[in-house]
């Protein structure tokens, strides 16, 4: 099923690349991060072309819940303790500025995309200390936040950390309008990148700077992003006839849900899990429907969809230079569940770097920021998943049409009955029943049996 954003949108088709060309900047990926980056580069007088394997906005941008927030679950207290106050301030300021920049652009261009300022709230049914700590940390970093003991959700809570002046919008309506100002080649799949040369199935682009903004970078070395990220899936159901809160809510408890009003609908989300991990008999959509029936008797589902998010070891995005060995390559990835705001942050930081500036807020997002204790723990867990899944590729694969080993690095794929896909537990590539690639970092389809 397609997301609610796909229902009323037509984005003008663009021609594929026709042969070789040169450009100051080549941006790989026509999602929000790629198009915003190309747009700001153009504003700065730097030409950029965007290369898209499929259609504009056909990746994760269409599967979001479209919240634009500096409230990113429990993060600020941890950031201050781990990276110090100055870097934590940079994270908060960059995300707050991103909300304001969306609003400025939308007003300036008259984009009809339902941009609305709303509070974003973390709630818990049992915990108050963590919420109070988070609220205090956010306030210390300049965010308008407060702690409350009650809220508008249809159940009792122990507490709520409320961030004011956050926002939400219709991401594809915004993207469609902004894309009109950017040079984009659709149906142009990047096959290889070497130094300043981007090789696609339609021709080569030679560029002074190259931006990887296509969700998960497919280049393994340098950068080693495959070792520093995994992917998570999460699920959303759009409900009609459910009472809509004014604010947007995210539960911090293990079974917490997310609530986001959207026109006459309520978007109810949850059920996150590492991509490719066995789900047993549990159906995430059914879990959401059950909760919806309990909380909003009489409501009904209008549509449902799932999202795929890149998760980094320390929970912060990787935005900046791709690797010390490739000074003209840049990356925007690892946005976690916060892709809308992180896309704007990426566009501003990468534009500044390409224009020769070194913005101070870039330090906390840099892929080369200090390695933390949390990152070390996550690296061990990630490594264990990879070793087990790599070892499994030696097991008999049964009588399937395809060979269920991931073409990225060989891990054994797991069948996901809920979404009828083969999913990779190592780095999150996905394939349909016939083995066709759905999500990278893999670049090719699965091998079929002879
Ligand atoms: Fe890396 Fe499958 S995505 S091995």
Image: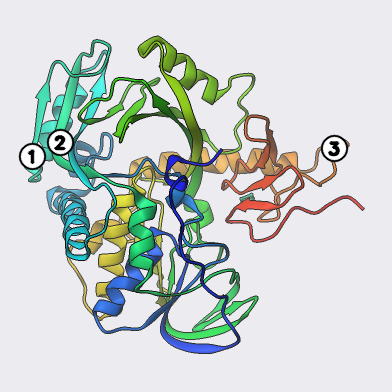
Query: Residue 163, labelled with which disc?
Result: 2
Q: Nearer the viewer, residue 227 or 126?
A: 126
Above or below — where is 244 with respect to 421? above
Measured as percent of width and height from the top left, residue 104 is found at: 16, 60
Query: Between marks 3 and 1, how big is the CA–CA gap?
Result: 56 Å
Instruction: Describe the element under mark 2 as helix, strand or loop.
Output: strand
Query: Residue 378, labelled with which disc?
Result: none
What residue sits right under mark 3 in the picture? 396
Q: Nearer the viewer, residue 332 or 269?
A: 269
Query: Residue 144, labelled with which disc?
Result: 1
Query: Between marks 1 and 2, how big is the CA–CA gap?
Result: 6 Å
Answer whether residue 310 is visible to the viewer in this image: no
Above or below — where is 358 with respect to 195? above
Of circles 3 and 1, the one toward us is: 1
Above or below — where is 124 with respect to 449? above
Answer whether residue 203 is visible to the viewer in this image: yes
Classify mark 3: residues with Cα within 10 Å, few (<14), some (14-19) or many (20+). few
Q: Quadrant of the N terminus?
A: top right
Give the mark nearer the N terminus: 3 vs 1: 1
Instruction: Describe the element under mark 3 as helix, strand or loop.
Output: loop
Question: Is residue 431 rendered to the left or right of residue 110?
Answer: right
Measured as percent of width and height from the top left, residue 59 is found at: 50, 54
Using the rendered view, name the quadrant where residue 263 is placed: top left
| Residue at left offset 32%, top offset 31% | 264
Q: Nearer the viewer, residue 22 or 159?
A: 22
Give the mark nearer the N terminus: 3 vs 2: 2
Cβ of disc 1 within 8 Å of ligand 1?
no
| Residue at left offset 24%, top offset 28% | 122
The reply to whether discs 1 and 2 touch (Cβ–Cβ < 8 Å) is yes
Measured as percent of width and height from the top left, residue 446 is found at: 75, 52
Instruction: Describe the element under mark 1 as helix, strand or loop.
Output: loop
Query: Between marks 3 and 2, how big is the CA–CA gap?
Result: 52 Å
């Amino acid at each position: 099923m397609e997301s609610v954003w796909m229902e009323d949108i037509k984005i003008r088709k663009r021609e594929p690349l026709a042969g070789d060309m040169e450009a100051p900047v080549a941006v790989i990926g026509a999602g929000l991060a790629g198009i915003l980056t190309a747009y700001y580069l153009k504003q700065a007088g730097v030409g950029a072309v965007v290369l898209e394997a499929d259609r504009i906005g056909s990746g994760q941008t269409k599967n979001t819940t479209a919240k634009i927030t500096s409230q990113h679950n429990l993060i600020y207290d941890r950031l201050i303790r781990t990276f110090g106050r100055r870097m934590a301030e940079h994270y908060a300021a960059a995300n707050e500025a991103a909300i304001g920049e969306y609003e400025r652009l939308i007003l300036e261009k008259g984009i009809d995309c339902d941009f609305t300022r709303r509070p974003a709230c973390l709630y818990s049914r049992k915990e108050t200390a963590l919420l109070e700590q988070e609220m205090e940390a956010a306030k210390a970093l300049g965010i308008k936040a407060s702690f409350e003991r009650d809220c508008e959700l249809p159940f009792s809570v122990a507490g709520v950390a409320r961030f004011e002046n956050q926002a939400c919008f219709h991401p594809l309506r915004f993207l469609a309008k902004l894309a009109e100002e950017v040079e984009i080649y659709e149906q142009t799949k990047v096959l290889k990148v070497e130094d300043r040369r981007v090789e696609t199935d339609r021709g080569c682009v030679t560029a002074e700077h190259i931006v990887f903004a296509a969700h998960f970078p497919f280049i393994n070395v340098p950068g080693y992003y495959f070792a520093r990220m995994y992917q998570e899936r999460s699920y959303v159901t759009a409900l009609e006839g459910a009472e809509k809160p004014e604010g947007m809510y995210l539960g911090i408890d293990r079974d917490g849900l997310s609530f986001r009003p959207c026109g006459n609908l309520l978007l109810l989300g949850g059920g996150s899990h590492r991509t490719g991990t066995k789900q047993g008999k549990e159906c995430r959509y059914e879990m959401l429907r059950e909760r919806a029936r309990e909380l909003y008797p009489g409501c009904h589902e209008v549509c449902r969809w799932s999202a795929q998010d890149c998760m980094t070891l320390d929970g912060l995005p990787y935005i900046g230079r791709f690797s010390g060995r490739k000074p003209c390559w840049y990356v925007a990835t690892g946005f976690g569940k916060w892709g809308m705001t992180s896309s704007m942050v990426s566009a501003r930081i990468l534009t500044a770097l390409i224009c020769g500036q070194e913005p101070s807020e870039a330090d906390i997002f840099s892929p080369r920021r200090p390695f933390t204790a949390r990152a070390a723990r996550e690296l061990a867990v990630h490594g264990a998943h990879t070793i087990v899944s790599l070892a499994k590729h030696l097991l008999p694969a049964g009588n399937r049409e395809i060979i269920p080993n991931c073409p990225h690095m060989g891990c054994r794929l797991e069948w996901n009955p809920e979404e009828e896909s083969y999913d990779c537990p190592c780095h999150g590539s996905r394939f349909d029943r016939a083995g066709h690639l759905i999500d990278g970092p893999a670049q090719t389809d699965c091998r079929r049996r002879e």
